[in-house]
Amino acid sequence: MSKIHVSTTVNGDAVEYLCDPRETLLDCLRDKLSLTGAKEGCGTGDCGACSVTLDGRLVCSCLVLGVEAEGKEIGTVEGIAEGDVLHPLQQKFIDYAALQCGICTPGILVAAKALLEQNPDPTEEEVRFWLAGNLCRCTGYDKIIRAVMDTAKDMREAV
Amino acid sequence: MSVAKPLPHDAAPLHVAGTARYVDDIPTPRDTLHLAFGLSTIAKGRITAMDLDAVRQAPGVVLVMTADDLPFANDVSPSIHDEPLLSDGTVNYVGQPIFAVVATSHLAARKAVRRARIDYAEEPAILTIEQALAANSRFEDGPRIYEKGDAEAAIAGAAHVIEGTFELGGQEHFYLEGQAALALPGEGGDMLVHSSTQHPTEIQHKVAEALGVPMHAVRVETRRMGGGFGGKESQGNALAVACAVAARATGRACKMRYDRDDDMVITGKRHAFRIAYRAGFDTEGRILGVSFLHHAICGWAQDLSLPVADRAMLHADNAYLLPNARIESHRLKTNTQSATAYRGFGGPQGMVGIERVMDHAAHVLGIDPVELRQRNYYAAPAGGSAPHTPRSISSEMKENTTPYGQVVEDFELHGMTEALLASSDYATRKAAVAAWNAANPIVKRGIAFSPVKFGISFTLTHLNQAGALVHVYQDGSVHLNHGGTEMGQGLFQKVAQVAASRFGIPLEMVKITATDTAKVPNTSATAASSGSDLNGMAVKAACDTIRDRMAASLAERHQAEVASVRFGNGQVEVGEARYSFAEAAALAYQGRISLSATGFYKTPKIEWDRIQGRGRPFYYFAYGASVTEVAVDTLTGEYRILRADILHDAGASLNPDLDIGQVEGGYVQGAGWLTTEELVWDDHGRLRTHAPSTYKIPACSDRPEVFNVALWDGQNREDTIYRSKAVGEPPFMLGISAWLALSDAVASCGDAYPALNAPATAEEVWKGIRRLGDGI
């Protein structure tokens, strides 16, 4: 099948790739753009390891086709830090030891950042249910929730 | 000193940036090929015809391999060579790999396998315990039996006899990174394999067998796994071997990763058990004798089932001194995935058995379940739990033996239980739960306590060894390598803390490197919670060798006693002289002192006869205790964990942050096993729960609303690395209290004992409520 040319923006950078119309955005990010931060955990939109934002909206990139990125703005974990300066969420995840094997971490950071952008003052319950689509098998989630809550507090106070 | 500090995971900065590389993230050569397996669709039978022409003609396909195409061994078993990589013509479960496709992309390979046409002569499959027993389908000739005293006589003479049978489901590991391997062919027949494995040496061994080369021609490297939990102890063999064989055949790099559904359908899981029990208690609630009958569903190949089932027997006592005990264990061979290692390795199943007995007895005798447990605890060590004191084992202590004859010398649970009951406000909350249940007809609450005593050491004694390789460079930086693998548990960081402490240097000067069979050979799997115990000691030995050489050289230079040379704060002091560690390293180099050393460790004191069921299989025990409170909707069976309180014994923790992470994650995973995680096979042997859409691991929303976790302030009585204790598996079993809390809530709906099966899904809880409500 002939490939389709896609022009899109990833973490603020204009990029282009050729893809099979059936390829997922996840595979395009990983295989064509070498952005391997988004992971395939299930391939069916149930685990959140492939979370990215598409025009600011949180999506599972395994459920989005690469061709759908045409003209859109994609945000991945690689774009969360500003150069060498970590985003407060990233620093808190380190400080709180809110990760173990780390493979869910990129998706959870993307999802948590999307939450805080639309709701800077979430309740703990809102955090727990917002992140319910991001599975973690290692941590038991406690440190993750506390890291997100504490980041939100810091970011509110910094404004 | 770096040890005992709460430092983050060594790769945390990479993880939050998304730049930590897992096998599937490693840049590959442009012409890398990708593999997928064609899987059987029946549970038992023979292949009568196989038409793979359409597969070969599929877009992107380069090679198709069947068993006939394998040049050497067709085996990926970790034990008795009973597990062919590709079907030898027989089919033993739905999902068994029959052929492999090698194609230009992952997707092309997966699409191509669907084109196969395979005809089978189907035979009756063995899927249930009843079918296996009827056919005498089992591993080993008959059951293993461990005995202490005369259980039957003790039960017969007891004031109270309780008995029951329950089902205990298996568990999918659900490591978030699926199985993956990448093989890169080298010159002269060499092969480099990157594998997501807990056991690089096993991968090396099986790849060498499959390629018909000595082990020296195969190098296996594992930087990290995205979760293991036992599921990557033997289950990665197939991918690594298939990739290596394909790489040899094509001369190109070959990579394979299982799609999640394939992963769940192909790979083994935790052993499901049926446990029957009969126990006799006196009127005070003291157990006089207990008899357990374990039926373990092992699947089609032996894999690690024998030691798993043994460990279940070895934890049939948990924290309780059983004066008389009999444990009979049947290891049944069925036409399902080959059950394998999973965090706790059978221990959790054995422990759930005795916790069920205690819970049932407390209900029948009308004694508080915690009180009844405490009355049956092993005795505390003479002289309290203070470390470093010579142990005097009184004659009473000699009676403090497990059903397999090991004396329990380090029992910590008396003090831990009292501390946890106080910190969790157990008595008040127990009364509040009763008051709530009296006032509320629909939502019922339950609260339960459970202790953990978990034996530390591989029961296969020779596995209790480890090696390390340490280099000090002339700028004072240190290269660290050992046989342990990193799967998220923080092993690499804990061992690096040991190395930094031995040299007295900042942690930043120690480079953590990938596990590599070319650096440290003949390693054991990172399993049995042994990672930091074994590798920490091996690294300590290597560091001390180099340190002693540096000290001797400096002492000679300054005409000082070797013992007077001190390492600390990044410096080395000899008398009045003071060098930075880098200067000391440079001087040693110039003095022609070797700054590279290997280290080795083997666990002392252990010996074990698994046939007789006698000996000291464990160097020591790790302890824990938990209290869980739940709320149950009696109309639907749905429930929530409201609060969990945990006190866990990690000895003198090498890193409290990482250890608490293990405890929290272990509890949640253990609670998941016993509550929402249900594996369902249909009558044809097809696993119907093969993705997160149908298999429910705990999510963020399931986390206890109140979650209090603390480490017990203690030290290992045995001489382990900095007196720490293993922490990988033991906390998993803290989750048993969640299951017991559900039982407690259900018990408030009637007079009978709820007798829940596990997992206690909402459906199972609902059924339990109906049973009690109907007075059955």
Image: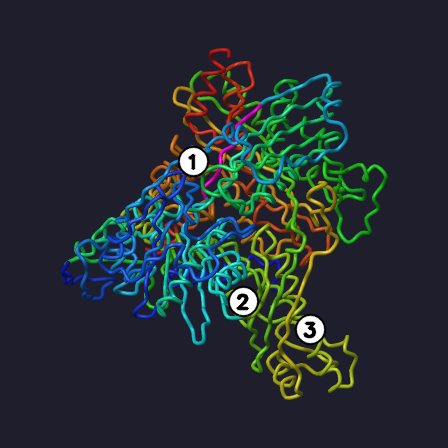
Residue B179: x and y in percent read 42, 53
- Residue at 53 percent across and 28 percent down: it is B134
Label 2 crowd bin: few (<14), some (14–19), many (20+), radius 10 Å: some
The three-letter amino acid code for the residue at tag 3 is Thr
- Disc 1 marks which amino acid? Leu
In front here: B488 or A10? B488
- Tell me which label, 2 or 3, sits earlier in the chain: 2
Discs 1 and 2 lie in a common subunit: yes
Q: Is residue B535 left or right of residue A156?
A: right
- Alpha-carbon distance for marks 1 and 2? 38 Å
Query: Magenta region: which residues?
Result: B165-172
The answer to whether any part of residue B477 appears in the image is: yes
Q: Do the residues under discs 2 and 3 have CB atoms within 8 angstroms?
A: no
Image x and y of residue B397, in percent: 81, 39
Q: Position of residue B458 (x, y in %)?
A: 64, 50
Q: CA distance from mark 2 to mark 3?
A: 28 Å
Badge 1 or badge 2: first in the primary sequence? 2
Work out whether residue B678 or residue B367 is closer to the camera in this orientation and state it: B678
Which residue corresponds to the image point at 54% horizontal and 68% vertical from the top-left? B214
Tell me which amino acid carries mark 2: Met
Disc 1: CA contacts within 10 A as few (<14), some (14-19) or many (>=20): many
Nearest the eye: B298 or B350: B298
Q: Disc 3 designates what residue?
A: B545
Q: Which residue is mark 2?
A: B215
User: What residue did someone put label 1 on?
Assistant: B679
